Amino acid sequence: MKHRIALFASTILFTAAALNAAPPKPDADVTALAEAQAKGEISASEIVAYYLNRISEIDDNGPRLNAVIATFPDVLDQARRLDAERKAGKVRGPLHGIPVLVKDNVEVAGSVATTAGSLALKDNITNRDAPMIARLREAGAIILGKTNLSEWANIRSGGSTSGWSAVGGLTRNPHVLDRNTCGSSSGSGAAAAANLAPLTIGTETDGSIVCPSSVNGIVGFKPTLGLVSRSRIVPISHSQDTAGPMTRTVRDAALLLTAMAGSDPSDPATVEADQRKKDYAANLTGDALKGMRLGVPRDRIGDNPALKAGFEAALDVLRKQGAEIVDIADTRKGLDGLGEAEFEVLMVELKADLNAYLAETPPSVKARTLEQVIAFNKAEPAELRWFGQELFDLAQSKKGLDDPAYLEALAKSKRMAGPEGIDRLLRENKVDLLVSPTTGVAWKTDLVNGDQYSGPSASALPAIAGYPHLTVPMGAIEGLPLGISFIGTAWDDERVLQAGYDYEQASKARVEPAFKPSIEAALP
């Protein structure tokens, strides 16, 4: 039930102008696009038209990635206003005139619903910007459209298929089309990799930024919880949810984060954000790794020989940049029961947080509680065709946020992942950051059997603790991208980005999508 806002007449005119003005190069980053605008080589209107045309050619047709659910009908008007401002001498910053695609669980003012991929929210047109989106507009960014996601951010069922939603259909991996995009920020990952926009935004509860970034071969950054406002984003867990950048370069992620970050009176977790935030791109100098001690959790690398070889090659790059690699043999000591505690927290907070969000949706939204969403899904054949909603059912059975069992699980999970997890590992091994493979390679998409995760996963500890986690491309296996993770303690976002930037610049490991139908198709 994918829907696209039609822009036919005006798009055709501006697409022709964009082509005459030499469209952006396939690998154009934000800095290149900003410089081209400053020199008068291209306008924001022409940039937007170029990306609308690219979405039509690659996402709606051609390989048909299905990464973009909708584009905004006012997107060319946004661009024209910013072109007029530039002509008048007003430039808002490095994101002036730069298009951004936003995951469809984040509210954006206009005529496009915020659905979280669910037909229950197909009429959720709130006509308001999430505070994070308002910050992006103030910085001069153009909100181009909404990206597909794993429905309800992959919290409805343990048997789900990442990248599928009833609203957006199935998103395909642009590297190998029959492979999965991971989730839940599936569309943002595929769209960034395929250059459907210079910048995309995802959200993460546990892995939903870093996993799709890794398997789609891009940069993904989950910031410290509280650095970016969570208001007006369809929630799972207020103790773990955060939005973050998904881009093709670390510098672009830093520029996007700088615009997104800041305190929001409606989100108490962001009380420190204004005093903590920085210009995250200002100090990306390429020499941050010199003298840095990086801890390698040897028990979190997995068994895939090709992945292990790729990771060892990445460690060699880090050493050549001046980092000291410190092996850590046992990172799981004292963490028994962490997964169970996290799961209890997610189930309780899902019910409480989603009920609070749904209660404030427009009257056009008829499912106004989790219980009513469950009933809606039972009555709507498209919703439960491929997998069920047993996690929704479990969450509905939970008590409130004052339940002693929940409070105990919350305290336990935060303590174990943060002070007794990441912080202990950094302190005991005298290291600045942790580095490891982000996850395994993308598996074949299988709507009947669901996801087939393989290999390691670096997401849990920083997700539960609320600490920064960056993934950077680390090459590929048979055309399937790999990512390397850089993880720090709370509010260490700048140093994490600096380390990742140094590695990125030295390794040049990102691979461009090949849009292959499958790996097997090339075999004799």
Image (spheres, helix red, strand yellow):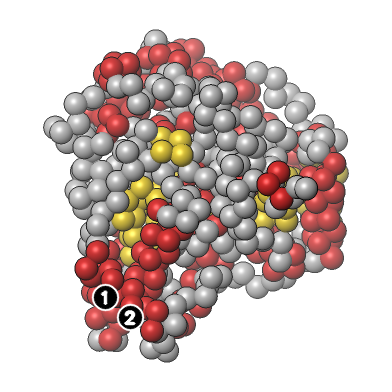
Do the CB atoms of the residues marked 2 and 1 lie less than 8 Å apart? Answer: yes
Q: Is residue 96 visible?
A: no
Residue at 44% in and 18% down: 388
> According to the image, label 2 marks what residue?
17
Q: In the rendered structure, which amino acid carries the disc numbered 2? A: Ala
The image shows residue 430, relative to residue 420, as above or below, that is: below
Residue underneath mark 1: 13
As rendered, which of 263 and 512 lies closer to the eye? Answer: 512
Q: Residue furthest left?
A: 363
- 32 left or right, relative to 103: right
In percent of width and height, residue 226 lies at 45, 45
Q: Residue at x 42, y 19 (%)?
A: 389
Q: Is residue 78 left or right of residue 302?
A: left
Amino acid at pointer 1: Leu
Q: Secondary structure at mark 2?
A: helix
In the rendered view, tell whether residue 22 sits above or below residue 8: below
